Image (tube, helix red, strand yellow):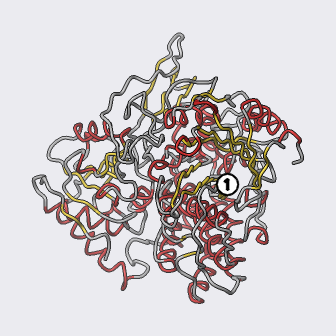
Amino acid sequence: MTDDSLKPEDLRLPANVTARRVVVDAAQWRACAQRLHDQGAGLLTLWGTDDRDRDGVFRVFAALLLPDQVVVLEHALAGGHTVYPALGHLFPVADRLQRALYDLLGLRADAGDGRPWLRHGGWPENIFPLRRDVGATQSYAIHAKPYPFVPVSGDGVHEIAVGPVHAGTIEPGHFRFSVVGEKVLRLEERLGYAHKGIAKRFDRLPLQEGHRLAARLCGDSTVAFSWAYCAALEAITETELPRRAAALRALALERERIANHLGDLGGLGNDAGLAFGLVQFSSLKEQLVRLNQDAFGQRYLFDYLLPGGVVIDLGARMIRSMLDEVAMLEQAVSSLRAIFDDHAGVQDRFRDAGRLSPELARAHGAIGLVGRASGIARDARIDLPWPPYDVLQPRRVLRSEGDVAARVQVRFDEIMDSLRLCQSLLQTLPEGPGLVPVPAAPPGRLGLGLIEGWRGPVLIALETAPDNRVRHCHAHDSSWQNWPLIEHAMIGNIVPDFPLINKSFNLAYSGHDG
Amino acid sequence: MFSILARIRRTGILSEPLPTPEARDAPLEKLQRDLQSVFGRALRIRHVDAGSCNGCELEIHALSNPYYNLEGSGIAFVASPRHADVLLVTGPVSVNMEEALKRTYEAMPDPKWVLAVGDCSTCTGVFGVNYATRGRVADVIPVDAVVNGCPPTPLALLRGLLQITGHAPPKASPSAVPADS
């Protein structure tokens, strides 16, 4: 990108991908965002920091994702101001991000939805927990007020309220359907039930321990988030990750992708009435996590990555077992795919259900798996490759139908490609150490880690404090982008199809709520 | 249809001869027998995610796969707290879930047991207590037994379910189950 409007203070930003940081004032904030929007950028995330202890100001940051790089706009709110220019008119995802930013830090966008998002009355209206004058362990009594859902009126329209406790083993969230008969006129989501104040918890945490917390932002994306954290810290400390460690991390990330896709395909089969699919895919997933246990000492890889590399290297015996498993899974998944594809009952439920058109997906900035099922050809592993993806060359998976069937096909395609990548990684595992020491980080540095997890890109923006501690850590899951799209995909569908459609998106609650 | 039947036949029954019997799965069969001898086929579980990272949920899901075959042991998850004997709670109770958790507990008929699952629910885990979390489940509703682990393995969860059988009337103080062995 060679835009003159991004001149003011344009700095290279430590990150595992190409990233720049542009310091702007309020007018430039909006102008830069507009210009980047016109060049095809999407807003990845928005966060703020309380820097009153350092230079007397609050700051807001916007990370924009261009096809080949990340640009972070940084805007200091001068003179004790707490209002910044809204970006919702350019990027719909900004609306909820702005509401969350207000709930946590008290910085208000000058336009957009003013309702609380993460604050459900668990802390007072005039308390902004991410401000530095709020104690790390301070807690408050609950004073909940009714949440003003957008009402839908008309002849025969009624509401169905679902959640936050659901009928199955699912994360908590609330869905408000306005329906006529079975047909959904409008769905409104209310999230934030799993909000754990993780950003506050990161504050002052030793930098060498932060990866454990990052790994628990979202349990099904633990490799993606812990890698993003480690990548940010390694970029700040200019640690060069050994190729072997990078390859082992990629192996873990692809296994995480395969495990989640297997689980989802089973769940989708079940939701479409084919219990056989659940039995088969859940068995395959169990075999995969058992091999994780044998190879890495844990079924889910919560503590496999740490700054500087990985905890356990892989021996020749485990490499052989994993190669055998790749062959087994390729065969099994192919035969199950044929069964799904040929099953009239399943296809009848999958096709046209929960359709997200490419136009709508583009307008709303859909990313990740959901985007790739609706014609959005974005995959950070391919567009902004970091080692080892620079040599690994994942294949681009793309569908344009945007319905449940398309999201199923993307999962099948991605499993097959991830198996290929695993095979390639296992056969060409570079020699060398799996772990190197990470030096102490200089204070006041900002670094990014961007990793394409199985749902989509996850981002960690890490700022360092003295004594090798975290000053601020912002985590972002691609579910922020895609949650509002379920509201659109549900319009005109019937209530009984909601579990199927929701499962086909399978977005994060904890990863979103923080 | 033929391909489904062929696949079922090829898959066989995974629950019985467990894949690595000596090392890890030998106690499993005994555990399943014990569970059945105590509960018969009557135990019903309601799960509430009170702010978990979703890691524990993955392992709770695994209980239903053919390897652990929880339903084959006569234990099943139910959709309503009014049908449940045991409340399985995960997460460091988030402030935003506190009310929903209490209401779910109150909606269960007596006698009822609460099993707190995962390090977050038993000792706050990595999240601690702050403006957004209350911490241990026991600080919000009475807990009868706990299963540690981050996340606990399905085997540890099965052991936890077994342990609460020793708690005929609900007890006040929680007792720990080893995370794994």
Q: Is residue A439 above or below residue B22?
A: above
Residue A440 as seen in the image, left or right of residue B138: right
Q: A457 above or below A427?
A: above
Q: Give the quadrant of residue A352.
A: top right
Closer to the camera in the image, B122 or A256: B122
Taking the view exactly as shown, the residue that stands out farthest to the bottom is A316
At which x and y percent is residue A197? 44, 46
Residue B46 in sight here: yes
Mark 1 chain: A
Q: Amino acid at mark 1?
A: Asp
Of A48 and B31, nearer the camera is A48
Instruction: Name the residue at 65% across, 77% down.
Output: A327
Q: Residue at x 63, y 72 (%)?
A: A251
Q: Nearer the viewer, residue A475 or A24?
A: A24
- Which residue is more in the foreground, A70 or B147? A70
Where residue B109 sits, quadrant-wise, is: top left
Q: Is residue B1 visible?
A: no
Residue identifier under label 1: A341
Instruction: Residue A368 in the image: state x and y as whole percent.
Output: 68, 50
- Measured as percent of width and height from the top left, residue A493 is found at 59, 31
> Secondary structure under badge 1?
helix
Q: Is residue A145 left or right of residue A35?
A: left
x 49%, y 43%: residue: A513
Mark 1 crowd level (few <14, some 14–19, many ≥20, 10 Å Cα)? few
Where residue A392 sits, quadrant-wise, is: bottom right
Asked if residue A426 lies left or right of residue A471, the reply is right
